[in-house]
Amino acid sequence: MTREKIKIILVVVGILDLLSFYRTYQIAQSLPEVISHPNIILILQIILVLSLLASGILSIAGKRISLLLYYIIGLETLRLIFTIRVHRKYYK
């Protein structure tokens, strides 16, 4: 893959991350609730939403670190949320 194609892919991924952030930023607005009543699911959701913002900006800027940020923080947070919810559903 050429450098130009990689740059285009990074910009597209960045735009998609920012669109996802725009669609879910209401979760991040619940930060005062997290401070007053800590909830692990809500904390993980806020981390996920903020990672979308950071990886979107870094992707559009052409930084490859954005992919690492997306995969490590974003996907691991999703896995944790899924694991906790499944555990709560089946192991009450």
Image (tube, grey):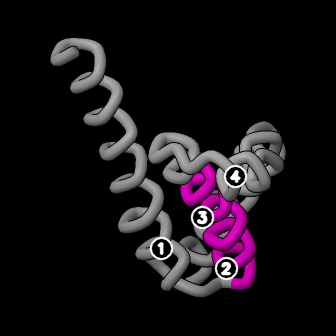
Sequence order check: which comes first, mark 2 or mark 1?
2
Q: Quadrant of the C terminus?
A: top left
Instruction: Say what secondary structure mark 1 lies in.
Output: helix
Depth order, front residue of 83/24? 83
Q: Which residue is located at x 65 percent, y 84 percent?
A: 62
- What is the CA distance from the residue labelled 3 to the residue labelled 1? 7 Å
In the image, residue 55 lies in the stretch drawn in magenta: yes
- The x, y position of residue 49, in whole percent, is 65, 53
For mark 2, what is the residue? 58
- The x, y position of residue 22, in whole percent, is 83, 46
- What is the CA distance from the residue labelled 2 to the residue labelled 1? 9 Å
For mark 4, what is the residue? 36
- The x, y position of residue 68, in whole percent, is 41, 75
- What is the CA distance from the residue labelled 4 to the residue labelled 3? 22 Å
Depth order, front residue of 11/57? 57
Q: Tags 3 and 1 in contact by the CB under 8 Å rule?
A: yes
Q: Tags 2 and 1 in contact by the CB under 8 Å rule?
A: yes
Question: For the residue marked with disc 3, what is the amino acid?
Answer: Ser
In the image, residue 20 lies in the stretch drawn in magenta: no
Sequence order check: which comes first, mark 4 or mark 1?
4
